[in-house]
Image (cartoon, rainbow, N blue to C red):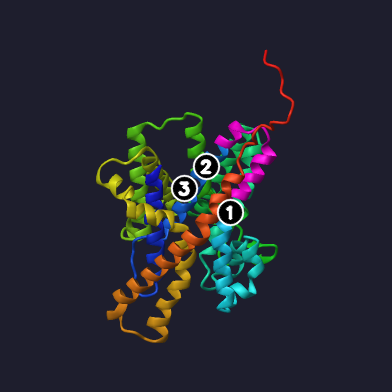
Amino acid sequence: MPQLNGLRAFCVLVVIFHHWTGAFVHFRFPFEAGAFFFFVLSGFLITRILLHAKDKSQNLPHTYRNFIIRRSLRIFPGYLLILAIHLLLNQADVRENILWYLFGIVNINFAFHGWQGGADQFWTLAIEQQFYILWGLALLFLPRKGALLLLWLSLLLPCLARSLPAFVGDNALSSLLRPGTLFGQELTMTGKLTWNAFDYIAAGCLYAYGRHEGWTLPKKPALIVGAISALVYLVVRTGYLNDYLPVQVKGLQQFFLIIGTLWVVHLAANGIPGLIGKILEHPITQSIGTKSYGLYLYHNLVGGLFYMAFIQHKIGMAWFPVVFLACSALVWGLASLSWKYLEEPIYKKKSKFPYTRKPDPKAPQLAPR
């Protein structure tokens, strides 16, 4: 599904653009939606892998162990390197909260204390790591119906928690689903808790589950619902019609984002024809998509140069394009080097950890009937 890799490229680019320019130029377009797209896409791709592995597995603990190892080979080389760089640069955020980063739970720290510094994008990586561990266990070891029920709850309850106050105001149920305090401490950013972001991932998981089970989406209704949902989200998020929209529609904006994103994933998974499809499958787009993880890891580190240039050294905005292009070249170089000499060589070792065990040639074989 190369077009999904192409979508990954555009999503990482809009996230980088948003993080680098947000302090200087105000855009109404919701560039941050690219980060949530990664959740939906990750849920879809990982669930496909797990379902196919489960179908072939004769030893589920072995399959789960190797799934975690393979994910670790993909995630941790670049992850640990960028943490080491932040420590060498003596960045207070990483230094003071290093255990939160190492154990993949820094999103919980952000939920309590808010943004910390130049490694803020790690909150999404923490949720991804928790997703691999928890969903891998659930899907592989729960009965199919139990896993499906868990998915529906993971999709609907966070959506309900997010939108319920718009319909009934703050009450006991909305406070229970989306608490303002946890363990007696006030939450600064509740949306960074794993539970409150899991509906995006669950949506992708459900779509993968449906495809695996042979569910089909009616083409025209899916097109209408997906396109309308994406449009409504853009209208609500940009705020151009805020004076004319009921508060209930505003409360459902993230639900519209999920449906719109699923629609785009559905289109790309089946192949978008024409010019858009050619752009998504272009070698340049594919190369960006392949290196999107490295770009995401390093972009905030390089983005610090933006703030140094324009805030500390007070460079005029006329130099904005030059600095932007220079930082773009730098982050691309870092991501390319990281992929070629660190990420790809280590990830290739995944072949040593197959999801299914090969038959032991020394084991006694049953005589054929």
Q: How crowded is mark 3: few (under 14 residues within 10 Å), some or many (20 or more)?
A: many
**Residue range highlighted in magenta:** 52-71
Picture quadrant of residue 104: bottom right
Q: Distance between the residues labelled 2 and 1?
A: 22 Å
Sequence-first disc among 2 and 1:
1
The residue that disc 3 covers is 41
The secondary structure type at the circle numbered 3 is: helix
Q: How far apart are marks 3 and 2 (CA)?
A: 9 Å
Q: Is residue 64 magenta?
A: yes
Please name which of the two marks, 3 or 1, marks the residue nearer to the observer: 1
The secondary structure type at the circle numbered 1 is: helix
Q: In which quarter of the image is the C terminus?
A: top right
Label for residue 49? none
Magenta span: chief secondary structure:
helix
Q: Which amino acid does label 3 sit on?
A: Leu
Please name which of the two marks, 2 or 1, marks the residue nearer to the observer: 1
Label for residue 73? 1
Left/right placement of residue 290 relative to residue 127 reads left
The residue that disc 2 covers is 205
Left/right placement of residue 203 relative to residue 17 reads right
Tell me: residue 208, above or below residue 9: above
Q: What residue type is labelled 2?
A: Cys
Q: Residues within 10 Å of mark 2 (few under 14, many from 20)?
A: many
Q: Is residue 31 visible?
A: no
